[in-house]
Image (spheres, rainbow, N blue to C red):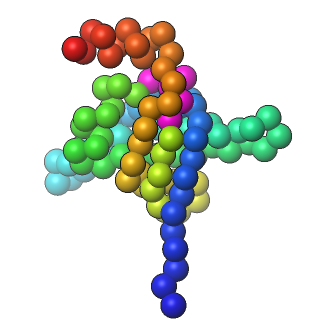
């Protein structure tokens, strides 16, 4: 019987993403999302790969609220398949305006 591995997190980015390259040259972005609800603490490491990392990283900033769906890897690491922006901070809006 096959298993099901789906992770869904809504929370705030705790630090600006770090971008790096895999040995193959593909971009990889990593950042932490805090999904704490006041009672339970939830910190998840999110990984974006390839085109998703390249396109979204310039718009991801500390304090940005995001919705992330993907699959769990080791520990609290989520390999993102989808990401949506839910709310932006002033610094994020300023960065997005400068990028246009």
Residue 62 visible in image: no
Magenta segment, prevailing SS (helix, strand or loop): loop
Q: Specify whether residue 64 is painted magenta.
A: yes
Closer-to-camera residue (85/47): 85
Residue at (71% x, 38% y) in the render: 36
> Horizontal placement of 23 versus 87: left or right?
left
Q: In the image, residue 47 lies at what x, y percent? A: 41, 47
Q: Specify whether residue 37 is painted magenta.
A: no
Q: Residue furthest right?
A: 39
Closer-to-camera residue (35/14): 35
> Horizontal placement of 42 versus 3: left or right?
right
Q: Residue furthest left?
A: 25
- Residue 59 versus residue 10 in the image, above or below: above
Q: In the image, residue 98 lies at what x, y percent? A: 27, 9
> Horizontal placement of 13 versus 23: left or right?
right
Residue at (28% x, 43% y) in the render: 52
Residue at (52% x, 74% y) in the render: 4
Segment colored magenta: 61-66
Closer-to-camera residue (57/96): 96
State which quarter of the image contains the C terminus: top left
- Residue 40 versus residue 55 in the image, above or below: below
Q: Quadrant of residue 96?
A: top left
Q: In the image, residue 73 lies at what x, y percent? A: 49, 62
Residue at (55% x, 52% y) in the render: 8
């Amino acid at each position: 019987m096959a298993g099901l591995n789906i992770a869904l997190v809504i929370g705030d980015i705790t630090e600006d993403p770090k971008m790096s390259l895999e040995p193959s040259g593909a971009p990889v972005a990593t950042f932490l999302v805090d999904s704490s609800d006041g009672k339970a603490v939830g910190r998840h490491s999110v990984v974006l790969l390839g085109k998703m990392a390249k396109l979204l990283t310039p718009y991801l900033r500390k304090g940005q609220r995001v919705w992330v769906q993907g699959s769990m890897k080791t520990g609290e690491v989520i390999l993102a398949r989808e990401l949506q922006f839910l709310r932006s901070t002033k610094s994020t809006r300023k960065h997005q305006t400068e990028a246009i």
